[in-house]
Amino acid sequence: MTPSPHALELAQTLVRMNTVSHHSNLELIHFIRDHLAKLGVKSRLTFNEDKTKANLFATLGEGKPAGVILSGHTDTVPWDGQDWSMDPLSALVKDGRLYGRGSADMKAFIGVAVSQAEQFLNSDAPFAVHLAFSYEEEIGCFGVKELIADLRDANIRPLACIVGEPTSMVPAIAHKGVYRYKCCVRGKEAHSSLTPHSVNAIEMAARVVGRVRDMAEDFEKNEPRFEGFDVPFSTSSVGQFHGGIADNVVPRDAEFRYEFRDLPTANAAQMQSEVVAYAKSLEPAMKKVAPAAGFEFETICEIPSFLGSKDDPVTRLAQELSGEKGTTLVAFGTEAGLFKNAGIPTVVCGPGSIQQAHQPDEYVSLDQLARCETFMQGLARTRTLG
């Protein structure tokens, strides 16, 4: 199977655009906006604070009572330090694969969706198709939160959402959440020969790091399993730690970052509350030496877990369109939980494999692109979501 030349060309065009999360995505957003405008379709854009990035929402089939969202994020992770055998922005087609950063995650899906715009417009389906393309998914799903808020304010109420993350076109009905935090510790410096007159920020931070590790071990030993995940329990881990200026100076400052990946049946807010409560229990002794000492926490990102159902009409639709009888769970986070929490039944289903995403020589197979295109064509012919 191979995709149509138009679908492949659009996917290649998007891959060639540098939309790493710390760059603007406006080149891509404006390209899609202008492409849709030629078909008479208006796009709603919602911007970040400095107007360097935007979400795009467009309705194909304006006037129909409700619609199905095809959702994708436009940003990619960087490739600095990775050993690529080609230009990451080359969009090279070779040996039945489309290579390039974002090819699997997830510009192929977006390109195929846009390539079917005219077919969606001419569809006799009783529902519209909405295209929803966001910014900054890779660093915290920040853009889609603005997009969903805009839909709510505009009283747009879609029937369902298909998030096109790479699942090899197998409908996914659950994933864990991703919650990341930064903890800054303020102590009191002193010469290392006078430790009783100091508050060692690294040591205080280490105690909280130890609590995060204790929680991880407790999840592994005691949390009820959610079978189907590669790791069927919640996890916690520390990813960064910084502090100290010299061996003979008791450090005043320390900082670390950590994350929880919670099962859909777990409570990430409760996990974070436990960490904060433990840190606060250490403060009285710290403040006896230095009243300004203590802990401050900052939220880096909060991506809720997702739990759909194999019985949801949108899941059954995705199974029918993809030709897959079963469903799967995925280990990575997506925007699906945010759409579901907004009251929109959601499933995750898209071309390519997460095993290729974020990797050197990232690729999506042309066979997967073709399967995605067939999926989209079937959606245009669908008569009911029931």
Image (spheres, grey):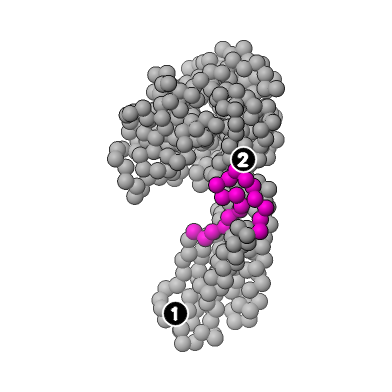
Name the outermost residue toward the left: 85
Which residue type carries mark 1? Val
Q: Nearer the viewer, mark 1 or mark 2?
A: 2
Q: Give the range drawn in magenta.
A: 222-239
Which is more N-terminal, label 2 or label 1? 2
Secondary structure that dominates the magenta span? loop
Q: Is mark 2 on a helix, strand or loop?
A: strand
The N terminus is located in which quarter?
A: top left
The residue singled out by tag 2 in the image is: 174
Q: Can residue 114 be seen in the rendering of this structure?
A: no
Q: Position of residue 17 (x, y in %)?
A: 39, 34
- Asked whether, in this view, residue 11 is left or right of residue 312, the answer is left
Q: Residue at the spot x=67%, y=66% of the render?
A: 277
- Asked whether, in this view, residue 18 is left or right of residue 72, the answer is left
Q: Can residue 211 be seen in the rendering of this structure?
A: yes
**Position of 61 relative to 134 (above/below):** above
Q: Position of residue 385 (x, y in %)?
A: 67, 22
The residue singled out by tag 1 in the image is: 249
**Position of 366 relative to 102 (above/below):** above
Q: Residue at the spot x=64%, y=64% of the render?
A: 276
Q: What is the number of callouts on the image?
A: 2
Rate crowding at label 1 as few (under 14), some (14 to 19) or many (20 or more) other CA atoms within 10 Å: some
Which residue type carries mark 2? Ala
Q: Is mark 1 on a helix, strand or loop?
A: strand
Quadrant in the rendering for residue 358: top left
Q: Residue at the spot x=37%, y=35% of the render?
A: 100
Q: Where is residue 154 in the image (x, y as percent from the top left)?
A: 67, 30
Q: Cα distance, mark 1 to mark 2?
A: 49 Å
Q: Residue at the spot x=41%, y=26% of the render?
A: 366
Q: Does the magenta segment cover residue 226?
A: yes
Q: Does the magenta segment cover residue 47?
A: no
Nearest the viewer among 96 and 339 is 96
